[in-house]
Amino acid sequence: MYSFIDKGKEDISLRSEGTAGITRSFIENKMDRVEGLKYKVYYYGSMFRYEQPQKGRFREFRQFGAESFGNAKVQEDFLMILMLDDIFKELGIKSKLKINSLGCNDCNPKYKKELLNFVEPKKTF
């Protein structure tokens, strides 16, 4: 978080990403309580990070994002991913779309168990 005290002695924090603000607004306006509401929003703007600038990484940067509320179906994730992929293509931004999954409710526990088999157990002394 990029925070500082301004000339008027106010404590200021600049936004570091878009999702948190969108989610807070959604909840503060009680939209999460509206039965059956499906809500999509996109945003673009300046975001800020505190760490020292590095090659290709500046304190101020632009971020585009999209959020979807009220639809827990996997198809919604699919539509959001395709929408962003289409936007990249229209803007001429070269990208490579790779999709992965942890599986469904039935196969996820088996996946987690197999994944844990690859983790070396902690040694106790």
Image (cartoon, grey):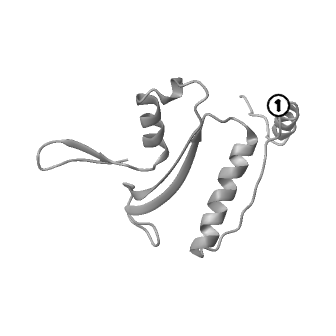
| Secondary structure type for disc 1 | loop
Quadrant in which residue 35 is drawn: top right
122 vs 31, left or right, is: right
- Residue at point 11% right, 45% down? 8
- For the C terminus, the quadrant is top right
Report crowding for label 1: few under 14, some 14 to 19, many 20 or more residues within 10 A (C-alpha).
Answer: few
Q: Toward the viewer: 49 or 79? A: 79
In the image, residue 106 sits, relative to residue 46, either above or below, namely: above
Which residue has dot 1 on it?
105
The spot of residue 18 in percent (x, y) is 46, 48
Q: Toward the viewer: 48 or 120? A: 48
The spot of residue 104 in percent (x, y) is 83, 36
Residue flagged by tag 1: what amino acid is it?
A: Asn
80 vs 4, left or right, is: right
- Residue at point 85% right, 33% down? 113
The spot of residue 98 in percent (x, y) is 75, 60
- Residue at point 37% right, 61% down? 59
In the image, residue 108 sits, relative to residue 85, either above or below, namely: above
In the image, residue 117 sits, relative to residue 30, either above or below, namely: below
